[in-house]
Amino acid sequence: MKIKVEEQKVRIDKFLADKTDYSRSKIQKLIKDELVLVNDEIINASFNVKEGDLVYVTDFKDEVIDILPEKMDLDIVYEDEYLAVINKQSNLVVHPAVGNWSHTLVNGLMYHFNKLSNNGIRPGIVHRLDKDTSGLMLVAKTDLVHEKLSNMISKKEVERKYIALVHGIVKHEKGTIEAPIGRDFNNRQKYTVTDINAKESVTHFATINRLKEVTLIECKLDTGRTHQIRVHMEYIDHPIVNDPVYGKKKNASEFGQMLHSKSIKFNHPMTNEVLYFEADVPKEFTDILKGFEE
């Protein structure tokens, strides 16, 4: 559902209550589950819309909103009473969404852990990885820890590094891409570098190895926008190998984009202990990489 705002200034929850037949509780749930966007941006219930804004609402069926635990093989790198660090496999959706309520990482987390932070249809999920991006993720077990970790990420106090294989030979040893990212209005499934309804996005990269027609790089994020590394690497004409959305049409294999969350470093939100974890790239990543070495 798309609604154009004609009022001068009104809270989003009141606006939707006036413009739809949804109950107040359902509106709150839609907003909490990030199913309400204003100008393609996630908002909270106190957000004020203004004349000219576009409100997008993705409805859900109440009878399927309950997320069920599913037995799943998970690579749990670290766990304590407050949080966990998961090494997510490629080809695994992180959280349920409209049309995809099962077989996600969240379903597996609910099976393995007795408690998770209450985050709507994304219990425990502090930050996300794309379906075909593998590697390390933080999981919160309590609401307090979830809030603290989220604040740490927004303040750039969580260091995340990724390994990516990109098309072409990257000439620079190091570089920084500072380019705002927003929704691609020509394709709502994609994001792009734009000045329209965009957010600041900063990606640092360093060259690891130059191979035949490709380059292996390490990326460090200052911000955590949706598809950030994928969008930024396409922007500088070095799209990620095997990326089905932002890459070249011909893929090296059926394996997803060659992007892996390699390491994560942060101070424990409750004990202040410095925690650092690394995860090797998947075997499929290594096999594809070897193909470019020949």
Image (cartoon, grey):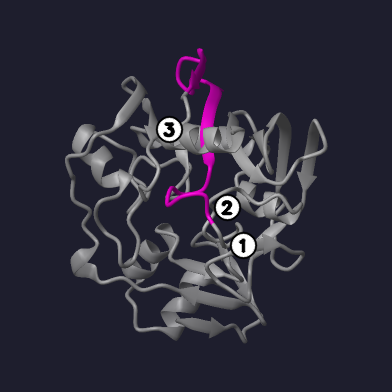
Q: How many marks?
A: 3
Q: Could you tell me residue 228's position as x and y percent?
A: 62, 50
Give the residue at x 49% y 62%. Answer: 45
Q: Which residue is mark 1?
A: 191
**Quadrant of residue 30 in the image?**
bottom left
Residue visible at 73% across and 68% down in the picture: 196
Please name the amino acid that badge 2 sits on: His
Closer-to-camera residue (103/241): 241
Q: Return the residue at label 3.
A: 282
| Type of the residue with mark 3 | Pro
Q: Secondary structure at mark 3?
A: loop
Q: From the viewer's perspective, is residue 92 above or below residue 24?
A: above
Residue that carries the numbered disc 2 in the rendered image = 227
Asked whether the beta carbons under mark 1 and mark 3 sit within 8 Å of each other, the answer is no
Question: Are the residues flagged by discs 2 and 1 in contact, CB closer than 8 Å?
Answer: yes
- Classify the position of the C terminus by image quarter: top right
Between the C-alphas of marks 3 and 2, the distance is 20 Å
Question: How many angstroms separate mark 2 from mark 1 (CA)?
Answer: 7 Å
Q: Amino acid at mark 1?
A: Tyr
Answer whether residue 276 is magenta in the image.
yes
Q: Quadrant of the N terminus?
A: bottom left
Q: Is residue 184 magenta?
A: no
User: Is disc 1 surrounded by few (<14), some (14 to 19) or many (20+) residues within 10 Å?
Assistant: many
Q: Of residues 122 and 174, which is closer to you in this image?
A: 174
Q: Along the horizontal axis of the image, is 15 left or right of 198?
A: left
Q: Position of residue 195 (x, y in %)?
A: 77, 64
